[in-house]
Image (spheres, rainbow, N blue to C red):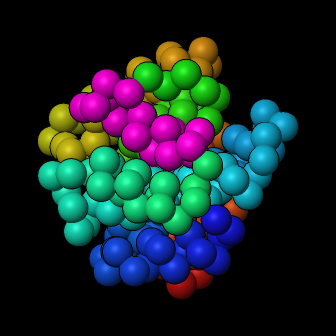
Amino acid sequence: MDRQAAWELLCEYTTGEGLRKHGLAVEAVMRHFARKHGQDEEAWAVVGLIHDFDYERFPDEHPQRGAEILRARGLPEASVQAVLAHGDHLGVPRDTLLAKVLYAVDELAGFVTAVALVRPNKSIHEVEPASVRKKMKDRAFARSVSRDGILKGAQELGVELDGHIAEVIAAMSAVAPALGLAGLSSS
């Protein structure tokens, strides 16, 4: 599956702008980490883009329903397994770097987006790891985002949390206009 086919799949199953932008954010972050680890940038970006494509239509069967669709469309099994493992509720082991990275960036990308959107200028360029860590302590803020998942993701990757947050912010900053996070004066 190439990037265009992945985008079309996301748009076919997802009408909400927020979930589409989340896919774009995770795509950018996965591309960054693929480059960092010498992996297939396009394959990792596709996984990031489509990891939640089925959520809007099948929230109670996500990502199992999506995995069936992805297999039928020829996505490699390692990519399907990464999608299945990007949450803890199915108990699918994260036994590849692809799966570990997807898990480690999914919740964090959503949380970073939320932090950027409460900034006066609504700009990711104003977000720092310290501000993300501070907001993580406020359980009422972005309450649907799993703080435990963010911490566990960094731990499973064997990276320090602040550095991991900084990399996610940098990767998302590179596509800030597409995410609606370039700031009020830039939009």
The residue depicted at 61 percent of the width and 27 percent of the height is 96
Q: Is residue 124 above or below residue 76?
A: below
Given residues 62 and 115, the one toward you in this image is 62
Check the picture and name the quadrant holding the N terminus.
Answer: bottom right
The residue depicted at 47 percent of the width and 61 percent of the height is 72
Q: Is residue 20 left or right of residue 141?
A: right
Residue 143 falls inside the magenta stretch: no
Q: Is residue 17 above or below residue 147?
A: below
Q: Is residue 9 above or below residue 25?
A: below
Given residues 66 and 122, the one toward you in this image is 66
Specify whether residue 164 is in view.
no
Residue 159 image-quadrant placement: top right
Query: Residue 118: x and y, percent?
Result: 34, 59
The magenta segment: 77-92
Query: Residue 70: x and y, percent?
Result: 47, 58
Given residues 113 and 148, the one toward you in this image is 148
The residue depicted at 64 percent of the width and 29 percent of the height is 97
Spot the residue most to the right: 38
Residue 81 falls inside the magenta stretch: yes
Q: Is residue 22 left or right of residue 61?
A: right
Q: Is residue 33 left or right of residue 29?
A: right
Query: Residue 11: x and y, percent?
Result: 43, 79
Specify whether residue 12 is in view.
yes
